[in-house]
Amino acid sequence: MENNRFTNEEQNEKSTETGVSDEGRQKPQGGKTSGKTIAVIGIAVVAVIAAFLIFQNVIAPINTYRGGEELLAARDYDGAAAVFDGLGDYKDAPDRALDAKYQKAEAMFRSGDYDEAASAFEDLRDYKDAPDRVLGAKYQKAVTYFMADKYDEAIGAFTVILNYKDAADKVLEAKYQRAKACLADGDYNAAIAEFKSLDDYRDAPKQLHAAFYIAAESLLASGDYDGAIALFIELGDYNDALDRASDIRQSAGADASAIAAEETNAAAAKKAAEDAIAAAIKVAEDAKAATIRAAGDAKTAAGKIAEEKKTAAQEAAGDAVSAVTKAMDDARAAAAKKAEDAKNAAANAKDAMRNLTDDKDEASK
């Protein structure tokens, strides 16, 4: 132990002489350890950043892309389009977004939402065959109107796409069907005008002649002989139109006197009816005036009687008040007299008592 202590002391003295302690000798070793730690931490930070960047730029987009595909497979077209749009330029995300929107427009077309489908295809601009699909959706909308007998709407819808497929022919067909509908509804003028505008389309000329003929018969039934004759003449050689015009002229001439007599009788009957109505109105007005006068007289008499009763009642009330007032005055006078008598009686009694006392005093003496 002494040798060891001596050795330690020598070492301390040497350290003191050289100015280097144990701590001093260990510092270089400690500094080296701190540098390694910083290096390890730096590597770890770089690794974390690299992992984050890999996740953000590689793994996350892959997962998001797959999620968009799953939404598209589930027919969530809006959701899928939003996911692909959010991916920016990743892979073919822009095209996938457009495809999702295209499929949505297709789905609306299949379900019969042609207006919405046309709008969706228009938003896609030149993607695939979107421009042609816009026209197709509008065409189907026009066909829907036509099938529902909405010819005005169908004509308007087909006219917008007049150069698409057979839209121009569809316009003519819709006008043709509209003319037939007007004829069936008795709107002969509209039917005639429509068939005229169709020129030689299908059997429009034949339908025009039929419309003229039916319109002429309608005018004849209503008594418009001149109008009926004019239409039959305009029909020319169609069926028996000219014969019908001649027959109407002859019938109208033969019946002119009878018609005039009937018109005269009708006018006389009308005048008699008007006179009877006027007389009845006068009788009613006279009766009304008499009733008003009687009601006024009755009201006046009733008012006079009421006024007389009111005056009598007022007089009776005045008499009653006077009687009550007199009775009250009499009662007050009687009460005052009784009070005075009582007062006097009390005074007399008092005097009598005084005299009696005086007599007793006198007798005692």
Image: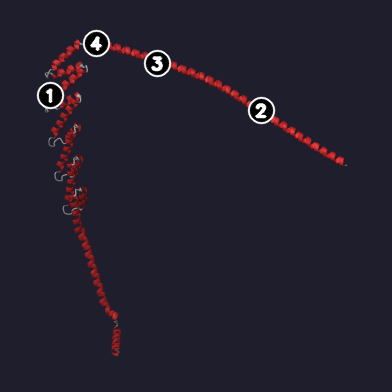
Identify the residue shown where x is 17% and y is 13%. 249
Q: Are marks 1 and 2 in contact (CB under 8 Å)?
A: no
Q: Which amino acid type is shown beneath numbered disc 1?
A: Lys
Residue identifier under label 4: 260
Image quarter of residue 245: top left
Image quarter of residue 50: bottom left
Decide if residue 217 is on the left or right side of residue 276: left
Q: Alpha-carbon distance for marks 2 and 3?
A: 63 Å
Q: Alpha-carbon distance for marks 4 and 3?
A: 36 Å
- Sequence-wise, which precedes: disc 1 or disc 2? 1
Q: Which amino acid type is shown beneath numbered disc 2?
A: Ala
Q: Secondary structure at mark 4?
A: helix
Q: Alpha-carbon distance for marks 1 and 2?
A: 118 Å
Q: Where residue 141 sits: x, y (%)?
A: 18, 37
Q: Nearer the viewer, residue 18 or 195?
A: 195
Which numbered circle lies on residue 206?
1
Identify the residue shown where x is 16% and y is 38%. 140
Q: Nearer the viewer, residue 6 or 360?
A: 360
Q: Residue furthest right?
A: 365
